[in-house]
Structure formats: C-alpha cells, structure tokens
Image: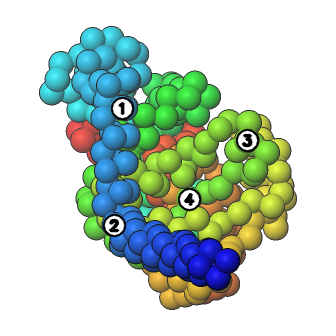
Amino acid sequence: MKTIKNNIIKAYNDAIKTDIEKVSIDNKKIKNNIENMDDIKSILKGFKDIILDFIYPKNITCIICDNPIKLTNTYSMCKDCFKELNFLKDACLKCGKPIINHNLEYEDITDCAYCRQRTFYFDRAISCIEYNKTSKKMILDFKYKNKTYFCRYVAQIMSEKMELENIIADYLLFVPLHKKRLRKRGFNQSEKIAQDLSDITGIPVLNCIFREKNTKRLYNLNRFERQQELKNSFIIKDDENLLHNKNVILVDDIFTTGSTSNEISKMLKLIPVQKITVLALLTRTANPYVSFEQNN
C-alpha cells in the first residue's frame, strides 16, 4: 500500500513538473513572438499587398474609367483621366485653396480671398487636386463602392505632395467617422489613406481622435451650419502625452470649407500640439482652377 501511495505522489509531482516546464516553454514562445511582432506585421503587409495586386492588378486598367492602360501610366490612370485632374500648384499658403489667375499678372498667393474674415486653428492646409467631375468619381468609388485599393494611389499622391512642400511631422492623424457611420460603411477612408501614407513615409499613425456626435451629412450645409453642427463633436485621447508639442499631419479625403479640420485643430491646440498641417486629396473651389502656366 505504501509503495502504491509513493508511486501516486511521484506521478503527481512529475505531472506538475511537466506542466511547469510546458508553461515556461510557452512563455518563452510568447516572448519570442512579441519580439518578432514587427517581422510578423511586415509579413502580413506583404501578404496584403500580394492579395491586392492579385485582385486589383496594377497598371492593367484605369482606376477611374476602367479602360486598358499601359504599364508605365502614372497612378494607374489612363492619359485622358490624368489630364482631367488639376494638380494644384498655385495655392494659398494657409487654406490650400487654389489661387485663381484670371489675368496674365500673377496674383499674390499670400492674399487669399477665401481666408479673409476666417479664423483657422491649423497652421496650414494642403490639398493635392481640385475637386471636379473626374476627381469626384475617384473619391465616390473609393468611399461608396468599396474600392479601398484606391488609397494606395491617394497615399502616393499625398507623399509626393509632402516631399514637394517639404512637409514633415512626428505623427499622422486622421479625421474619424462616428461609430454608427463606420459600422455602416465598414471602413474609414481617411484612416486607410493615413495607414498607407505611413507605410510610404515611415511616420507613425495615432488613432486618438474620436467623433462623439453623429453629425448630419455636411455636403448640403453652408459654412455657418457646418460650424454649428460640428461644434463639440470631437474628443482627443492622448493619455500618454504623445502629442504634446509635436508636429502632426491631419489626413482627410476632401477639404471643403475646412470646418471639420478646424474643429479638430481647435481641440489639438488645447493639448497643445505645436504645428498642425491638414493634408487632403481634394479641395473645392468656386471657380475652375487656372494655373499661371495656362494663362501664358
């Protein structure tokens, strides 16, 4: 009986020892996995790019009109669509709205009619392309037809604009959607653009801006109505004080009146953030954009 009892105790102790060793091995694996997390992320990104390239092959058809294109076409666009995009050059140094040159004389880009009698909390807004029929289709397909692969080309355009304007920052932020609208759409286009822009530039993305108020759609509201609708709609969560005295880029798809970017910038300045650059793909203008070169 004593021998049986000793054998039971020995078996029990061996089992405990085995479990302890197993836990130790598992903990070591977990530690190694954590240390290799960057490698895992890199591998997953590679798989994502491969899948996207398989589903939406680059430079086979135009991303706007779906017509066949050559492999060398810029941004995977046909030449006709590319010509319809007005890439902004002469723009206000504050709001980024295009300076309209109606005369042969070059207008002073520091004297912007749109900025007069307006207070902006951001330091500068930069847009890449004028909002017109062609660029509108690009954004609408992106947002409402789930063509999220567009964000790769949008991020590429933005990164080139950043390089041209010598824009640098500590963090990329993005304009958030309310959780109800995010649930309905399935993604936030500004967040996706920011993530791809981060991959290109190496600037990290912070998800720290939240939309508490489910605002009305703003496209049919005037500037004053937008300001009232957006008032106190956003909160900034910066528990680790990462934004304190930092330079940030706030990414959005369209800069219309600037009301959304301005409301967020007002909250960021309270932290305080040192410098805020709003970066958008498109901006609206009351008149068609006419570059200085076209007038000559």
Query: Is tag 1's residue or tag 2's residue first in the polypeptide sequence?
Result: 2
| Element at label 4 | strand
Identity, as a three-letter code, of the amino acid under mark 2 = Asn
Residue visible at 61% across and 57% down in the picture = 175
Q: Quadrant of residue 271?
A: bottom right
Mark sitting earlier along the chain (2/3):
2
The residue where tag 1 is placed is 51
Q: Report x, y in % for residue 162.
A: 32, 60
- The answer to whether the residue labelled 1 contacts the one labelled 2, judged by CB atoms less than 8 Å apart, is no
Q: Are the residues tagged 3 and 4 within 8 Å (C-beta)? A: no
Q: Is residue 209 left or right of residue 94?
A: right
Residue displayed at 46% across by 48% down: 193
Quarter occupied by residue 55: top left
Mark pair 3, 1: CA separation: 24 Å
Q: Position of residue 170 (x, y in %)?
A: 41, 76
Type of residue at label 4?
Phe
Q: How far, Cα to Cα, is label 4 from label 1?
A: 25 Å
Q: CA distance from mark 1 to mark 2?
A: 23 Å
Element class at badge 2: loop
- Per the image, the residue denoted by label 2 is 36
Q: Residue at x 51, y 76 (%)?
A: 14
Callout 3: SS: helix
Q: Say if residue 145 shows up in the picture.
A: yes
Q: Which mark is residue 178?
A: none
Amino acid type of disc 3? Answer: Arg
Which numbered disc, 3 or 4, marks the residue that appears first in the sequence? 4
According to the picture, the residue beneath numbered tag 4 turns out to be: 174
